[in-house]
Amino acid sequence: ERERTLAMIKPDGLLGNYTDKIKTIILESGFGIIKERMVQLDDEKAALFYAEHSGKSFFQSLVKYMTSGPVYVMVLEKPDAVSRWRALIGPTDARKAKVSHPSSIRAMCGSDLERNCVHGSDSPQSAAREISFFFGDISPAVTKHDE
Ligand code: CMP
């Protein structure tokens, strides 16, 4: 069954010119890109997007990083899109990714635990929330049942 996830290229990924490389990996991995846009987050929007981390020690720094430049958000679709995209990006800590998952996207373009160059929704529920956060209501994925 088709599923959707939110993928984001973070400010360090855009600054490092990784957008084309990342989009090539996405398409070669069989994802459809349903929607895409560039967004400059402000403090309020970044804090809202990461509301679940608002009590954490790294929250202020995270908001500063995520507002330091534009981000590129995409809605990806394919079967098991959430877990497939998470597998492609690799572990949160890009420094660890370089050792344990050297062919992952974070190993390629990330720097450390914070500056990890890409985001992926962690569950179908998060994906639904994050997709509507950036794109509002969009038509749902076509399921086998509808076809
Ligand atoms: P992501 O998993 O996409 O969403 C939460 C982000 O917070 C994460 O990527 C990192 O950019 C950042 N982050 C998570 N844990 C830490 C941490 N312990 N210290 C600093 N930044 C973190």
Image: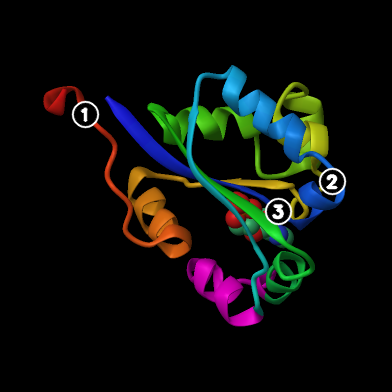
User: Which amino acid type is marked by label 1?
Assistant: Thr
- Residue bearing the label numbered 1: 143
SS type, badge 3: loop
Tell me where the magenta segment starts and ends, as one range: 43-59
Question: Where is residue 57 shown, x and y percent of the image?
Answer: 67, 72
Question: Quick one: label 1 or label 2, which is nearer the N terminus?
Answer: 2
SS type, badge 2: loop
User: Which amino acid type is marked by label 2?
Assistant: Ser
Label 1, label 2: how far apart the Cα atoms are: 38 Å
Horizontal arrangement in the rendering, residue 68 relative to residue 4 (left or right): right
Ligand 1 located in image quadrant: bottom right
Question: Quick one: label 3 or label 2, which is nearer the N terminus?
Answer: 3
Label 3, label 2: how far apart the Cα atoms are: 12 Å
- Residue bearing the label numbered 2: 111
- Residue bearing the label numbered 3: 10
Question: Where is residue 141 shown, x and y percent of the image?
Answer: 29, 37
Label 3, label 1: how far apart the Cα atoms are: 30 Å
- Name the quadrant containing residue 120: top right
Which residue is at 72% across, 44% downward?
93
Mark nearer the viewer, 3 or 1: 1
Beta carbon of the mark 3 residue lies under 8 A of ligand 1: yes
- Name the quadrant containing residue 87: top right
Q: Is residue 50 magenta?
A: yes
133 to 74, vertically: above or below: below
